[in-house]
Image (cartoon, grey):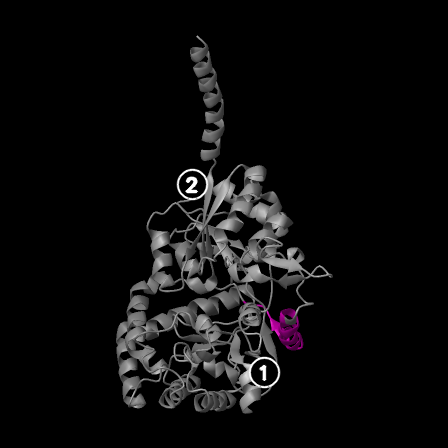
């Protein structure tokens, strides 16, 4: 009898525990995808994040990553493969409006204010306007824009310590960049001067020239300044990939000169680098022009300070020569809810919690205090031994920033170096981007054909890989025109001109 009673008591205890376990397992999970690589201590940090989310919202969040290697294909498959993704990083440089028009993202127009009113009120209406896209069914809000506005001007990352060691100029002009890279080649044969200049050689030209925007997909330039003292105008639009544009022709000539000089690997076209930042930190390259900005520079400074305390890195922002810098677009970094989201309302509430819970945002942004960073006597962020496993914004949460929740890092050497560049940018004239988004629907077939021609015939020229530039360029234009380059560019210019007229852009 006693054995039977003990068995019954054990069963009752087990049954009392089962509902708790089931409730724990039944918690809804918000599936998130970010760009970049997974940091070493991601799981440790997410465990702390989920403790807060369980308490506040009764849910958990999983953080997944799209690596930079072939990210475009992987990103497209995520959005077109029916995956149950709740929140995903998106950006104007990652074809966000194209995906939105094709129905990959959920329309948030009537959902945000109802499901996450604090989030709606906190993000400025101007930012929501940037996230609003005109479609055949009317205007839609296709993403949650960032609430953080900063300078997004691109620029050149370089080894300042090597300039000092070998008496080289900073790469702050096309000519000085050539001298700098030749000096690296002569004095540091173990490293390439750069590994990515040929992939985006149009960026090299920005050291001497200025334009407000260049659309890579169509080869259209906006707001170019060609005369000294000329002010850039958003209403000015022209064809950049054109035999009549001297900047474009000079770009290819410069790429060939630098490739012939051995500044980068001539096999780069067949095996392009997707990890220039990693190569830079490993001491394999000395300069990078590719897709950089002040925030990425700041991250590199922090990494280098930890891994190579004897190095000094510098940053030359594009536009300072002409006296201009750019503010970031609210959709430069943004977050979308996919059409296949299992929990759209809850996903918005998670975003609201991240933006309004200082402890949660700092945990996601910096890691665990005392483990991944310390605070100095002034309360400023300070690296420690754990920073290598989870540095600032290690989970690539660039779209999840709120200025008044950021930890002050100005007391550190890293902050001082970055602030010196910011001070120079503060002296320039800031420019806000426009909210224009090209609708390629009417020229979709031509766009695909043109992109294929660019990849096959123009990309090698941008790597400087040609024995006869004039002949190869003529072949490119012949193929590009047959594919529909002029039609695509004319449609872009038509839409953009109409946008400027309707919105009073000058």
Q: Is residue 361 magenta?
A: no
The quarter in which the C terminus is drawn is bottom right
The nearer-to-camera label among 1 and 2 is: 2
> Can you name the residue that lies furthest to the right here?
378
Task: Give the residue drawn at x 38%, y 73%.
Answer: 273
Q: Nearer the viewer, residue 10 or 154?
A: 10
Q: In the depicted view, which residue is nearer to us: 149 or 274? A: 274
Q: Which residue is mark 1?
A: 322
Other-residue count near label 2 (Cα within 10 Å), few / some / many at <14 / 14–19 / ≥20: some
User: What segment carries the magenta color?
Assistant: 414-433
Secondary structure under the numbered disc 2 in the rendered image: loop
**Residue 112 drawn at (x, y percent):** 54, 45
Asked whether, in this view, residue 100 is left or right of residue 207, the answer is left
x then y, percent, for residue 476: 29, 81
Report whether residue 169 is seen: no
Identify residue for label 2: 342
Does 14 sit above or below residue 157? above
Image quadrant for the N terminus?
Answer: top left
Q: Quadrant of residue 68?
A: bottom left
Residue 165 lies, with reference to residue 300, above or below; the image says below
State left or right for residue 403 relative to residue 201: right
């Amino acid at each position: 009898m006693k054995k039977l009673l003990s068995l019954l008591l054990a069963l009752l205890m087990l049954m009392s525990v089962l509902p708790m376990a089931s409730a724990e397992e039944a918690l809804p999970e918000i599936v998130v995808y970010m760009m970049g690589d997974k940091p070493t201590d991601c799981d440790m940090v997410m465990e702390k994040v989920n403790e807060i989310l369980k308490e506040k919202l009764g849910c958990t969040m999983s953080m997944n990553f799209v690596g930079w290697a072939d990210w475009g294909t992987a990103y497209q498959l995520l959005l077109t493969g029916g995956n149950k993704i709740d929140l995903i990083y998106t950006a104007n440089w990652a074809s966000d409006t194209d995906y939105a028009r094709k129905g990959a993202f959920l329309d948030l127009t009537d959902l945000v204010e109802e499901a996450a009113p604090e989030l709606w009120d906190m993000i400025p209406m101007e930012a929501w306007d940037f996230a609003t896209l005109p479609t055949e069914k009317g205007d839609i809000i296709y993403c949650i824009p960032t609430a953080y506005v900063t300078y997004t001007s691109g620029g050149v990352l370089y080894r300042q310590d090597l300039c000092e060691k070998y008496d080289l100029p900073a790469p702050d002009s096309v000519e000085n960049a050539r001298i700098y890279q030749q000096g690296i080649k002569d004095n540091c044969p173990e490293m390439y001067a750069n590994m990515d200049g040929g992939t985006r050689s149009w960026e090299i030209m920005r050291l001497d020239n200025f334009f407000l925007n260049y659309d890579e997909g169509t080869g259209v330039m906006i707001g170019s300044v060609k005369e000294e003292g000329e002010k850039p105008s958003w209403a000015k639009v022209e064809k950049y990939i054109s035999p009549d544009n001297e900047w474009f022709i000079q770009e290819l000539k410069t790429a060939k000169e630098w490739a012939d000089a051995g500044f980068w690997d001539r096999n780069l076209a067949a095996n392009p680098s997707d990890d220039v930042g990693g190569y830079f930190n490993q001491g394999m390259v000395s300069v990078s022009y590719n897709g950089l900005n002040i925030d990425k520079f700041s991250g590199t400074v922090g990494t280098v300070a930890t891994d190579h305390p004897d190095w000094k890195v510098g940053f030359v922002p594009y536009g300072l020569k002409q006296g201009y810098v750019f503010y970031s677009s609210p959709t430069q970094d943004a977050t979308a809810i996919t059409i296949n989201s299992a929990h759209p309302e809850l996903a918005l509430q998670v975003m609201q919690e991240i933006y309004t819970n200082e402890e949660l945002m700092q945990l996601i942004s910096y890691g665990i205090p005392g483990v991944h960073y310390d605070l100095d006597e002034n309360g400023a962020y300070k690296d420690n031994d754990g920073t290598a496993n989870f540095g600032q914004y290690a989970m690539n949460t660039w779209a999840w920033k709120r200025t008044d929740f950021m930890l002050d890092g100005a007391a550190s050497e890293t902050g001082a170096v970055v602030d010196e560049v910011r001070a120079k940018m503060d002296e320039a004239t800031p420019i806000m981007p426009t909210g224009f988004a090209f609708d390629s629907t009417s020229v979709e077939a031509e766009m695909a054909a043109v992109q294929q021609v660019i990849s096959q015939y123009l990309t090698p020229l941008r790597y400087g890989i040609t024995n006869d530039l004039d002949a190869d360029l003529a072949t490119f234009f012949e193929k590009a025109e047959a594919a529909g380059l002029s039609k695509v560019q004319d449609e872009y210019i038509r839409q953009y001109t109409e946008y400027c007229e309707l919105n009073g852009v000058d």
